[in-house]
Amino acid sequence: MTTSPRRPNVLLVTLDQFRGDCLSGHDDNDEHGNAKKHRAAKSIGTPWFAHLSYLRPHPPYTAAGRWSRAYDPSDVDMPIAPSSERHGFHEAVMQLPDTAAPRTEAGMRKMRAQYYGMIGEVDYQLGRVVAALRERGEWDNTIIVITADHGEQLGDHGLREKVGFFEQSYHIVGMVRSPRHGVGHGRVVDAFTENVDVLPTLCELLGSTTPAQCDGRSLVPWLAGETPSEWREMATWEYDWRQLYITDARDGAALNWPNDRRLERQNLCVQRDTHAAYVQFGNGDWLAFDIASDPTWRTPITDASHVLPLAQRMLTWRSQHAERRLSGMKLEDGGVGRWPDGVRWRETR
C-alpha cells in the first residue's frame, strides 16, 4: 500500500514591506529566532504556509550594526547618470527632496553601500531560516518564493526610491524554489514574469485550481526546465501621482472634480519589450527609448515609423484593460468613496 506524498509547505518572503506582526531583521534581536522556533515547533508534521516580510532594504538608507560597514563606499559601482535631455516629469522628480539622488559622489556611494548592506542583512536572515528548515527536515518539502512590491532607483537617472517610469523602480527580485523540480534549480529566466504569476504557480505546485479571475500564468514550466509557448513578450507598468492634487483647496482639482480633469492627467503607462520602451503620459506626452542598442534608457526613438507601432500596441492594450471601477475615488482608512464638500466618510457611518 502506498501513500501520497504530503502536501508541501510554502514560505513566501517579501522584501521592502512591513506589517505589524512582522519580525525584526536585526541579527542581534532574538525575536526573529524565538518566533521562528515557536512557529516551527507548532507546525511539525503539518503542511504550513508562512509569510516572512522584511522591511529591508528600505529608506532611510542606513543598514543595521555590522551591515552598515559591510561595503566600502569607495568600492561600490556608480549609478546610471541622467540624460542631458530630460522630460519635464523626470526633471521635476529630480528636484523633489524625497526622490532626488544625492548630489555628490560621496553621498551617492554612501547610499549605495548602505543599501547593499541591507541586502546582505536580509540574505543572512534568510540563511538562518534555510538552516532551520534543513535542521527540521523540511527543506526538501518547502516551496520558497522571494519577491518584492517594487524596485529602487538607487541613484540611477538622478533618482532614488520608487518613482517615475524607469524600470529600476519596477524590475524586482523573483525567486522560486520547488523541491520537486530539481532540474530548474539555479535556472535564470530572462522572459517577462510578473507578481501576478505567483498565485497560479503556487496553485499548480499545491495541486489546486487557479481562480479564473487571475491574470497571471504558472511558472511551473520554467521550474521544470521547459520554455512555455505563447509567453508574454513585454512588461507593462503604470505610475500615478494624482494624490498630490487631492487637497482641500477651493480651486483644487479634487473639490472641482469632475469639471476639473487634472486628476486624470497625473499618470503614465510604460510598455517595455526586448527592443524598445514606450512611455505614455496622461497629458498626451510620450517618450520612446531604444533598449536594444542602449539598455540605460538614454537613447530616444523619434522616427515616427518606429514610434507609431509602439503607441498603437499600448492603445490596444489599454483598450483591452479599460477597467475604471473606483476611478476618481480616494482610499481612506475605513472607507472608499467621494462625499459632498465638507463631509467625510466618518460622518456617514
Image (cartoon, grey):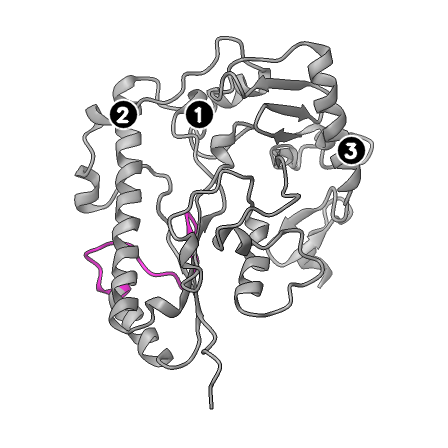
**Magenta segment main secondary structure:** loop
Identity of the residue drawn at 53% across and 13% down: 299
The residue where tag 3 is placed is 316
Left or right side of 55 for 192: right
Q: Disc 3 versus disc 1: distance between alpha carbons?
A: 31 Å
Q: Amino acid at mark 1?
A: Leu
Kindly give the residue lying farthest to the right in the view shown.
259
Task: Decide if residue 20 is in sight here.
Answer: no
Q: Is residue 135 above or below residue 106?
A: below
Q: Position of residue 242 (x, y in %)?
A: 65, 34
In the image, is residue 223 part of the stretch drawn in magenta? Answer: no
Q: Which mark is residue 159?
A: 1
Q: Position of residue 21 (x, y in %)?
A: 40, 64
Front label number (3 vs 1):
3
Q: Is residue 52 above or below residue 332?
A: below
Identity of the residue drawn at 69% across and 54% down: 336
Callout 2 touching callout 1 (CB < 8 Å)? no
The residue where tag 2 is placed is 109
Q: Disc 2 versus disc 1: distance between alpha carbons?
A: 14 Å
Front residue (pair 57, 329): 57
Identity of the residue drawn at 58% across and 23% down: 275
Q: Badge 1 local density, few (<14 within 10 Å), some, or many (20+)?
A: many
Left or right side of 30 for 300: right
How many marks the image carries: the answer is: 3
Q: Is residue 112 above or below residue 297?
A: below
Assign a secondary structure to mark 2: helix
In the image, is residue 15 part of the stretch drawn in magenta? Answer: yes
Assign a secondary structure to mark 3: helix
Q: Amino acid at mark 3?
A: Thr
Which contiguous range is marked in magenta? Answer: 12-32
